[in-house]
Image: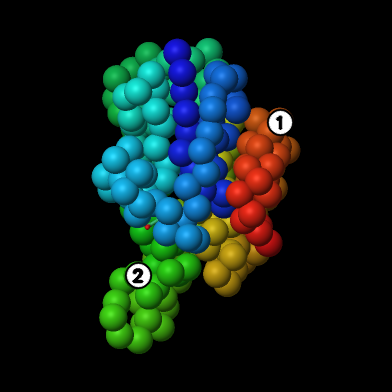
Amino acid sequence: MAIKLYHSPRACSRVTMNALEEVGLEYDEQVVNIFKQEQKSPEYLAIHPGGKVPALAVDGDVITENASILLYLHRRVPQAKLLPDVDSDIVRAQQASDLVWCSGTVHPMVRQVRMPIRFTDGDPSGVQEKGHEYVHGVAAQVSDRVANERWWYGDDWSIVDVYLFWLFTTAASAGFPVGDYPNLAALIERVQDRPSFERAIARETAAANKAGIKLS
Ligand SMILES: N[C@@H](CCC(=O)N[C@@H](CS)C(=O)NCC(=O)O)C(=O)O
């Protein structure tokens, strides 16, 4: 089965790349440089009409949206435990909800902090301020949840932790004070120790270098 990840270094496709590294499937990759608007090229729009990364091609079929790709990979390689093993349909739905929350609710808030200009034709400062307020709310929520836990799901690492890493480091790169939330900051540190995370960053960095993208 041929798998190909369309990604842009540093973007949310990093979560999917980490998942691919964790499940251990072989995959090919193609950089879609969003800093150069390559996601809007006719070639890429033919793959993902929404013009976003990530996209995962599996034998010619394309899956878009991080949450959906992650659930596919989890189902395909359950023993890799991208999400904890459960035998309740309700808990399974709650796990899906956590991923959809990351991508559909928190990601737009982070975008409001990082790229407020995408939300208004006018002065973006109010949009950004509001974004900060929303992200503070989520940071407090995550911080409370992991106060006495190692991971989002207690003792079990999951791809949700990687998603939270990406969301909050992206917000931090636009000035969000993650350090105000020590439990969350500690979670972000722990995520980086996982070998699959290290492999994903190495692969992403190599791809960025090859594509001439500078990752600061
Ligand atoms: N909900 C989507 C969000 C995808 C998304 O917004 N990707 C960003 C990179 S982090 C992108 O492609 N941005 C380019 C653009 O919006 O033009 C997902 O989780 O896959």
Q: How many marks?
A: 2
Pair 2/1: label in front: 2
| Residue at x 29%, y 77% (from the top left corner) | 120
Would you name the residue on which mark 2 appears? 118
Label 1 residue near ligand 1, CB within 8 Å: no
| Residue at x 65%, y 30% (from the top left corner) | 196
Would you name the residue on which mark 1 appears? 195
| Residue at x 59%, y 26% (from the top left corner) | 22
* Residue at far bottom of view: 123
Residue 19 versus residue 144: which sits nearer the camera? Answer: 19
Please, what is the three-letter code of the amino acid marked with disc 2?
Arg
Task: Indicate the position of residue 156 as horizontal and vertical percent values.
Answer: 57, 28
Task: Indicate the position of residue 148 as horizontal and vertical percent values.
Answer: 61, 42
Task: Indicate the position of residue 135 as horizontal and vertical percent values.
Answer: 45, 63
Mark on residue 89? Answer: none
Which quadrant holds residue 201? top right
Instruction: Give the secondary structure at mark 2.
Output: helix
Q: Residues at badges 2 and 1 in contact (C-beta under 8 Å)?
A: no
Position of residue 164 relative to residue 114, above or below, is above
Residue 89 is left or right of residue 158, and the answer is: left
